[in-house]
Image: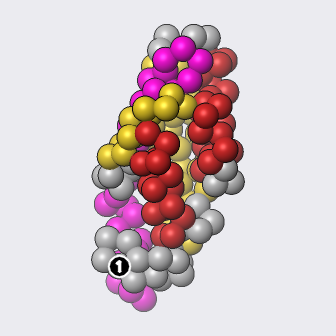
């Protein structure tokens, strides 16, 4: 698979699927048995599992946005470094909505099969996220 195709798939993954919550991209860019490990620790498989995870994130951060900082791609693997931004509007990790904007770093490792994404492993700065969710009046 070409580097430019990998980059295009990753951009579609983040900008269309996640920033616009567009699940219609699933069949276009993902294998049906997509394996996914989200930055909040959940492991999902297939379109239905990924859809559940997206709904979970959207409940916590309805305006969740991904900003791609870097993409490195070689062969059937690629890495993306990201910044996640969103307003905490739903309970997460037992923390009631703060209605505050949070920003935290993340990274995704992608594996490809043919013309599609087969596996995504995402790691996020959960410590940094929790610190923002639990800070109270500057504490």
For the residue labelled by badge 1, is the local secondary structure a helix, a strand or a loop?
loop
Occupied quadrant, residue 8: top right
Q: Against 84, is 6 above or below? A: above
Write down the quadrant of residue 130 in the picture: bottom left
Q: For the point 62% across and 48% down, which residue is it? A: 23
Task: Report x, y in % for residue 63.
Answer: 62, 66
Q: Which residue is mark 1?
A: 95
Residue 28 vertical placement versus 60 (above, below): above
Could you tell me which residue is drawn at 39 percent across and 35 percent down? 35
Q: Of residues 105 and 23, which is closer to you in this image?
A: 23
- State the residue at coordinates (65%, 40%): 25
Residue 74 magenta: no
Q: Which residues are magenta?
A: 111-139
Residue under the image location 45 percent in, 56 percent down: 52
Q: Mark 1 packing: few (<14 Cα in 10 Å), some, or many (20+)?
A: few
- Left or right: where 83 falls relative to 43: right
Residue 137 in sight from this viewpoint = yes
Q: Nearer the viewer, residue 46 or 74?
A: 46
Name the image colouring.
Answer: secondary structure
Q: Is residue 120 visible?
A: no
Question: From this viewpoint, which residue is outermost toward the bottom?
Answer: 137
* 113 falls in the magenta region: yes
Q: Tell me residue 44's x, y (percent).
A: 36, 45
């Amino acid at each position: 698979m070409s580097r430019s195709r990998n980059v295009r798939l990753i951009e579609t993954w983040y900008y269309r699927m996640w920033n616009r919550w567009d699940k219609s991209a699933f069949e276009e860019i993902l294998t049906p048995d997509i394996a996914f490990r989200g930055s909040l620790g959940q492991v999902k498989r297939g379109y239905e599992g990924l859809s559940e995870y997206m709904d979970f994130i959207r409940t916590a951060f309805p305006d969740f946005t991904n900003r791609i900082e870097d993409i490195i791609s070689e062969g059937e693997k690629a890495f993306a470094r990201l910044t996640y931004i969103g307003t905490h509007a739903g309970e997460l990790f037992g923390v009631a909505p703060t209605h505050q904007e949070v920003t935290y770093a993340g990274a995704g490792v992608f594996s490809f099969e043919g013309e599609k994404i087969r596996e995504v492993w995402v790691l996020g700065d959960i410590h940094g996220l929790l610190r923002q969710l639990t800070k109270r009046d500057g504490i």
